[in-house]
Amino acid sequence: MKHPLHVTSEIGELQTVLLHRPGHEVENLTPDYLGRLLFDDIPYLPIIQKEHDYFAQTLRNRGVEVLYLTTLVTEALHTEEIREKFVDDILSESKITGEGVYRNLKEYLLSFPTKEMVEKIMAGVRKSEIPVSKKQHLYEMLEDHYPFYLDPMPNLYFTRDPAATIGNGLTINRMREEARRRESLFMTYVIKYHPRFANHDIPIWFNRDYEFPMEGGDELVLSKDTIAIGISARTAAKAIERFALNLFKRQQEIKRVVAVEIPKSRAFMHLDTVFTMVDYDKFTIHPAIQGPEGNMNIFILEKGKDEETLKITRKTNLLETLKEVLGLKEIALIPCGGGDDIAGPREQWNDGSNTLAIAPGVVVTYDRNYVSNQLLRENGVEVIEVLSSELARGRGGPRCMSMPLVRKDI
Ligand SMILES: NC(=O)NCCC[C@H](N)C(=O)O
């Protein structure tokens, strides 16, 4: 039986990808909670959906099989017992503690058909949705002004981050921010209960119960033996160590993890917001992640003397490190916005460096980043542009919006 997960590079022909079409969760954004929910503005739902459909169709036109998170989760919750267990997990991770509220919410959620229930959990549950007559306890009647029992999950369309495929396995991530913490629970249920995944051996390289965070936007599969990972605002050094030890223990093909430190800022939240692979020997880069001499903090992690030890070598130059680990003489680093003082940061803010490679030298990018797109073309890369007015408001681009499940080997 063909394994449902197989990714040994960033650029091998994309065959199957997981997306999430934005739903009512983005309509539950209000100015008061934008920062906490990690948005900078409120997308207009019909247009963000239109743009997302265009993105999905662009991938299908290139022969990619597009799977949707809502469909997979719905199909995974195929018995009453699994549905109930899922609702229990969601409620306890949403910190619903009061017995009365818990019972009312559980009853409310389970009253929906499964697909609608999944959509409701994603969209969030407002306090006004539970009838006053159901409230029996004083604390339920004395509500504060916070509008939700269950917060919306507007970042779900960035399927890249909660889980990532490496080889035939996965990282199911502990998300750094509370607003995204529950997102990776969906993947736990999908691989455990969905028929497409349940009967396969799927190694978990890193799991969401680990105490330090790691997110998929920081994980880049540079080649079949080398993973790059950002030490970033979202991914902690301790998580990277655990991940590397697990990988070396169970996946003999992977020889090294290259940890690249990037500035911890909102604009650069993950490594893939400032650095992506577009061809065998070409990368996009936002120049602001390098110091004045092109210096950076880079660490190569390799197997140590035993299963709990790593050998760590420090490097300072990204270009030289990439040449070394990929065994190449020349590599092109293509600067976001051409490295211009204004176009560079402007296009990076709108994910100009966040390309999704669908084959070696073929990338999907946002149409608004015309300076970066032109430069990619001048470097021999085929650029397929997608619409980006509303999608960009969540601060993620085509790579962030896609979780590759299967790529052809290169
Ligand atoms: N890989 C990525 O950079 N994903 C974009 C995530 C954007 C989302 N609003 C977040 O702050 O987590």
Image: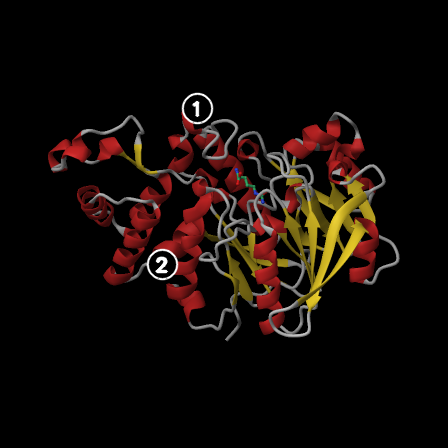
- Is the residue 354 above or below the residue 45 in the image? below
Tell me the amino acid under the disc marked 1. Pro
Tell me the amino acid under the disc marked 2. Glu
| Residue hosting label 1 | 31
| Residue hosting label 2 | 75
Residue most extreme to the right: 329
Q: Which mark is residue 7?
A: none
Image coords of residue 378 (percent x, y): 82, 40
Q: Nearer the viewer, residue 238 or 140?
A: 238
Label 2 residue SS: helix
Q: Nearer the viewer, residue 8 or 326?
A: 326
Label 1 residue SS: helix
Side (left or right) of 387 relative to 132: right
Mark positioned earlier in the residue sequence (1 or 2): 1
Q: Residue at x 73, y 55 (%)?
A: 299
From the viewer's perspective, is the residue at label 1 or at label 2 nearer?
1
The image quadrant where one finds ligand 1 is: top right
Q: Residue at x 44, y 47 (%)?
A: 181
Numbered marks: total: 2
Crowdedness of circle 1 by 10 Å Cα count: few (<14), some, many (20+)?
few
Find the distance from the CA under tag 1 to the CA under tag 2. Answer: 34 Å
Q: Is residue 64 visible?
A: no
Side (left or right) of 144 relative to 289: left
Q: Nearer the viewer, residue 280 or 97?
A: 97
Image coords of residue 99 (percent x, y): 19, 46
Crowdedness of circle 2 by 10 Å Cα count: few (<14), some, many (20+)?
some
Q: Residue at x 31, y 50 (%)?
A: 92
Q: Residue at x 44, y 31 (%)?
A: 45
Q: Is residue 37 visible?
A: yes
Image coords of residue 116 (percent x, y): 30, 46
